[in-house]
Amino acid sequence: MTVARKKPEKVWGFTVASFFGLIGVFVAKYLIDFLVLPAIFPQFYPSTGMAFVFWLITSLVATVVAMLWITRFGYFYPVADIVYAIIMAIWPLGLYGTAEFWPAILAALAAVVILWVIQRLVLWIFIIVGFITM
């Protein structure tokens, strides 16, 4: 049984709330990526392939959560990605060991590009599933 979900984005206040909610999801993602996971799995941090796999998993989970329960407005996501990158550049916390080789701004820009690709892929998956289930 599926429950019909009304689009909250049709109302201005919900659009503003979903914008800030999306930014909140990616700030929470940053905290999980750079504070929580390194504390839980110190053996994988700062620089292992597993740390990058964890980052990809949290990116995918944050994107799916945001698209399911916050908004699918595609033009909100680049802003949230940029906020994530700014936080990474200001408070890098070692950037999984990449800070030894690259400036923090380059790692943050790479994260934005990878996040954008993940978000586009997930958005297209949602679109295709929507067409199939119509």
Image: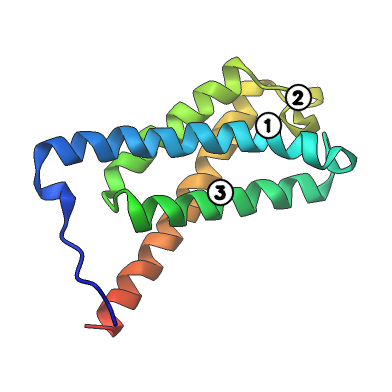
Residue furthest right in the image: 43
Where 26 sits versus 7, above or below? above
Residue under label 3: 59
x, y (%) of residue 130? 28, 75
Tell me if label 3 and label 1 are in contact, CB under 8 Å.
no
Marks 2 and 1: which is nearer the front? 1
Q: What crowding class fits label 3: few (fewer than 14 Cα within 10 Å), some (14-19), or many (20 or more)?
A: many
Relative to residue 123, is residue 78 depicted above or below? above
Q: CA distance from mark 3 to mark 1?
A: 13 Å
Labels 3 and 1: the sequence-earlier one = 1
Q: Quadrant of residue 101?
A: top right
Q: CA distance from mark 2 to mark 3?
A: 18 Å
Colour pattern of the rendering: rainbow
Q: Secondary structure at mark 2?
A: loop
Amino acid type at mark 2: Gly
In this rendered view, identify the residue nearer to me: 30 or 81: 30
Residue 34, numbered circle: 1
The image quarter in which residue 32 lies: top right
For the C terminus, the quadrant is: bottom left
Q: Position of residue 35 (x, y in %)?
A: 69, 30
Residue 45 image-quadrant placement: top right
Along the polypeptide, which appears first: circle 2 or circle 1? 1
Type of residue at label 1? Answer: Phe
Q: Secondary structure at mark 3?
A: helix
- Tell me: 97 left or right of 10: right
The residue at the point 45 percent across, 57 percent down is 64
Q: Which mark is residue 87?
A: none
As measured in the structure, the alpha-carbon distance from the residue carrying label 2 to the one carrying label 1 is 9 Å
Q: Residue at x 81, y 49 (%)?
A: 49
Quadrant the N terminus occupies: bottom left
**Residue hosting label 2:** 94
